[in-house]
Image (spheres, rainbow, N blue to C red):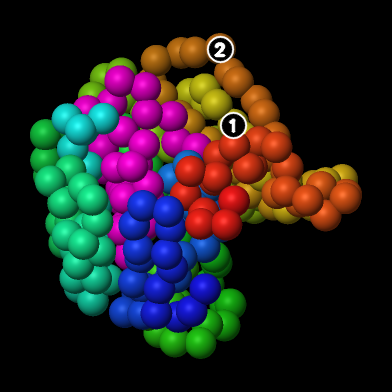
Amino acid sequence: MSSRGFTFKQFHINHDRCAMKVGTDGILLGAWAPLGAARRILDVGTGSGLVALMLAQRSEAAVNIVGLELDEAAAAQAEENALASPWPEKVSIERGALQQYSAPVFDLIVSNPPYFVHGQNFDCAARAGARHTVSLTLAELFSHGRRLLADDGNLALVLPVQALTEAMKQADSNGFVLCERADVITKEGKDPARFLMLFSRVKHCEKASEIVINTINDVHGDTYVRLVAPFYLKM
């Protein structure tokens, strides 16, 4: 992957004007997020538009996907990526912060939210803004997610291990329950590095699973391959 872009099987992502580049977290979220019968989807902090376009590839023609992005340069590039994709009629990019965003309710909200804490060093101010929990806290993500979701809507997130406790606290405070969780394990035998989590305000039986990226034999895990094979060129 170059700094200029990443080519998938059905679309290309340019990301040279985005603070956060195409990465494993976003790809896993876009491949995993359960679509169900969702017809309106919001991708919060869409960045280059990666997750929005992955969901466009996975969903039916009538689905409408909005990518919301605070940074103007990233929003402009996401818009270009969407227009150049096979689904320009399905994906629209809107500028602004979730805290001030208003729209008809969505059936599904997805986000690869900022999660690094203050005090970490970054190579540029834009990347710091994209990654620190300064522009959008988990508390705000859950409270505004509740505001923008249909009563039976779902919230899908990818989060690091250190954010789990806070995420569960904010979910409970806003009337959400965890209905699915997939532990992302980078190397078989190690502890999870990330969690893919699906929250709802409608109580479900909680489903738990694992996604092993690399096995002890240095091959990709079966579940990981099944998820990402529709997207990666060489898989």
* Residue at image point 60% right, 20% down: 207
Disc 2 crowd rating (10 Å Cα; few below 14, some 14-19, many 20+) is few
Numbered badge on residue 205: 2
Question: Relative to 116, does residue 151 appear above or below in the rendering?
Answer: above
Please tell me whether mark 1 sits on a helix, a strand or a loop.
strand
- Whether the magenta-drawn stretch holds residue 37 is answered as yes
Question: Relative to 187, does residue 90 appear above or below in the rendering?
Answer: above
| Coordinates of residue 44 in the picture (x, y in percent) | 31, 51
Number of marks in picture: 2
Which amino acid type is marked by label 1?
Answer: Arg
- The range drawn in magenta is 32-59
Please tell me whether mark 2 sits on a helix, a strand or a loop.
loop
Q: Earlier in the sequence, mark 2 or mark 1?
A: 1
Q: Tell me the residue that label 1 is attached to.
A: 181
* Residue at image point 30% right, 20% down: 37
| Coordinates of residue 222 in the picture (x, y in percent) | 70, 37
Residue in the foreground of this view, choosing between 193 and 37:
37
| Coordinates of residue 28 in the picture (x, y in percent) | 53, 47
